[in-house]
Image (spheres, rainbow, N blue to C red):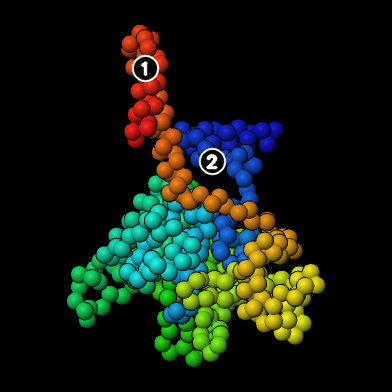
Amino acid sequence: MIKEEKMKALDAALSQIEKQFGKGSVMKLGDSGKNLNVETVPTGSLSLDIALGLGGIPKGRIVEIYGPESSGKTTVALHMVAEVQKRGGVAGFIDAEHALDPVYASRIGVDIDNLYISQPDNGEQAMEITETLVRSGAVDIIIVDSVAALVPKAEIDGDMGDSHVGLQARLMSQALRKLTAVISKSNCIVIFINQLREKIGVMFGNPETTTGGRALKFYSSIRLDVRKGEALKQAGEVIGNHTRIKVVKNKIAPPFKEAEFDIMFGQGISREGDIIDLAANIGVINKSGAWYAYNDAKIGQGRENAKAYLRENPAIMDEVEAKVREHYGLPVDKKPSEEKPADAAEKKAGDAAEKKAADASEKRSADNGGKNPGDAAGRKSADAAGE
């Protein structure tokens, strides 16, 4: 009896809420009709996908990538953009640092012709643009590079020596309060790249901290700490860096896992190097001394030669990667369509134009009382040939 009264009171409250705020304002989690599994997009590094736990970065969440200068933060973010674009997604880049290299981005795999870029004048403008893009629901990933470069308007308008304590932290706190719910509803990934600073007077513990206050640390579902390791040399020349990423915060899987991979100058993350290291760790590729072997066949002496072999034999590389993914419980990554988003858009526009022309032809035929349909078809063919 008491339970029935409670349910009646709850139903009355729910109907009042729906009347005031709209249908679906409150619902049972099981009745929402949503897939409770978190959707993810690969990062471009297999070892990082494994470290993140679900095979990539989650959609509809905020991600922070931070680390020292030249550690590979923007490179990692651009690989994520490339992966989203390969799957037909739309990407935006808020270049607050005014330092994006389009040639390098293109080499990594970013479709720069279809990358929406903004170089805002101040931090407020950057956050307004980000919010508008997210609210549109049409953008799948947005990179903000970087939080440290989001200078508040008051600081830009003021003199060089003026003190502006806490302005940037206040800006970030307000922006993230507005953005979080919209990001979740639009299923957009928003990645903030951040820099490191040193706390003054810290005697014990880590003196490093990120810019922009504490708000971003709280609102981020994932925080990645990127560090540059030893230089990779070939014939005495430095050709890249070994990079280590620690998952400092993870709301969708266990945190504190690490990923290691190579970033090659002018090329980005080395996919083949990533696969070789992971496959050697689980025994898919056998390493004996300096030699690497797969299925009892030697594939190269030294890591760089083994990487070159996989580059020249993509079918074997895909086969090894599939075995690594199966071992770690990740879905085998289906190759995205070779058709670029721009090509798909052109095709869609072409189909729409053809349909419009056909409708116009039918209308003309109807206006003529159905006379000479062959002439109308002939005119349509001639128009198409002329175009």
Residue found at the very far right of the displayed protein: 296
Mark nearer the N terminus (2 vs 1): 2
How packed mark 1 is, by other alpha carbons closer than 10 Å (few <14, some 14-19, many 20 or more), is few
Tag 2 secondary structure: loop
Asked whether residue 349 is in view, the answer is yes
In this view, 367 is above or below 32: above
Whole-number angstrom distance, CA of label 2 to CA of label 1: 60 Å
Q: Which residue is mark 2?
A: 26
Quadrant for the C terminus in the image = top left
Q: Position of residue 66 (x, y in %)?
A: 48, 73
Percent coordinates x, y for residue 264 in the rendering = 52, 76
Picture residue at 65% right of the left edge, 66% below the top = 313
Give the answer, above or below, for where 205 lies relative to 48: below
Left-right relation of 380 to 321: left
- The percent position of residue 7, horizontal first and vertical second, equals 63, 35
In-front residue for pair 238/200 = 238
Which residue lies at the image location 37% right of the left edge and 68% below the top edge? 100
Q: Residue type at mark 2?
A: Val
Q: How many marks?
A: 2
Q: Which mark is residue 375?
A: 1
Q: Residue at x 73, y 60 (%)?
A: 326
How many residues crowd around disc 2 within 10 Å: few (fewer than 14), some, or many (20 or more)? few
Name the image quarter holding residue 49. bottom right
Q: Seen in the image, is 315 located left or right of residue 177?
A: right
Q: Amino acid at mark 1?
A: Asp
User: Residue 11 at x, y = what percent?
Assistant: 57, 33
Which of the 4 image quadrants contains residue 201?
bottom left
Nearest the viewer among 77 and 128 is: 77
Q: Looking at the image, is mark 2 or mark 1 nearer the viewer?
A: 1
As helix, strand or loop, the secondary structure at mark 1 comes to helix
